[in-house]
Amino acid sequence: GPGIGELESLRASLKDLEERLAKATRPPEPEPEPSPLPPAEPFPGTDRTTTPDPARQRALKARLASKDPRDRVSAIDEILSGRHAELSGEVLFLLSDGYGYVRREAARAAGELGIREAHPILLERLPIETDPAAAAQIRVALGKITGTGYDARLHFGSEFDKLVEQWK
């Protein structure tokens, strides 16, 4: 009959065949659904190694909440410059500001910074936006956030709106 060495070899071969058969008959792992949005990138011009100055953050938040729309726009510009990227989420509240100019600048910042959380807000805002310049900037921001392209300025109507519908 077969020797012990041969039996061990046959057992190892049998075990290997069983493992390969189990792998071959196991259903494949489902692939995770890709995000419809492009991967997040770091905010331009930011240095994540420095600690934000709490006093400057408070002052910037105060300007974002100021009654004067010019203060709110200058605060948006400061966030856009990258000096206070950690406050970029504050721009979201200004997408529904009472002044079209502020809404336009907030949409521009959301697009430039790639603030994904702005996407549903911009989609809601687009059909009700009364300021044509703000509506155009919303389309541009949506194009940047969704990755559908920067040519959104050319499509103030149906073509770009069809692309936007895909993301709802």
Image: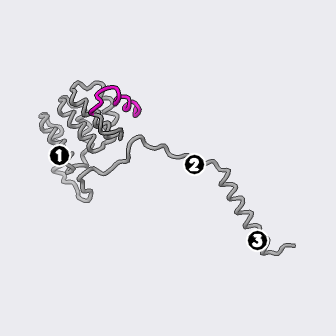
Name the side, left or right, on which 49 lies relative to 161.
Answer: left
Q: Residues within 10 Å of mark 3 (few under 14, many from 20)?
A: few
The disc, 3 or 2, on the residue closer to the chain's N-terminal end is 3
Name the foreground residue: 163 vs 1: 163
Q: Position of residue 164 (x, y in %)?
A: 36, 32
Q: Distance between the residues labelled 1 and 3?
A: 73 Å
Asked if residue 93 lies left or right of residue 146, the reply is left
How many residues crowd mark 2 within 10 Å: few (<14), some (14–19), many (20+)?
Answer: few
Chain part drawn in magenta: 153-168
Give yes or no for residue 30 being in the magenta stretch: no
Give residue 116's position: percent from left, percent from top: 33, 41
Q: Alpha carbon of mark 1 to alpha carbon of mark 2: how far? A: 46 Å
The residue that label 2 is drawn on is: 29
Asked which quadrant contains residue 4, the reply is bottom right
Q: Residue 78 carries which label?
A: 1
Q: Which residue is found at the position 25% from the left and 44% from the top?
A: 88
Residue where numbered disc 3 is placed: 8
In the structure shown, which secondary structural element does the residue marked by tag 2 occupy?
loop
Judged from the image, the secondary structure of the residue bearing numbered disc 3 is helix
Disc 1 residue type (three-letter): Glu
Q: Quadrant of residue 158?
A: top left
Task: Please tell me whether residue 61 is drawn above or below residue 130 in the rendered image.
Answer: below
Under mark 2, the amino acid is Glu
Q: Using the numbered discs, state the Cα–Cα distance from disc 3 to disc 2 in whole angstroms.
A: 33 Å
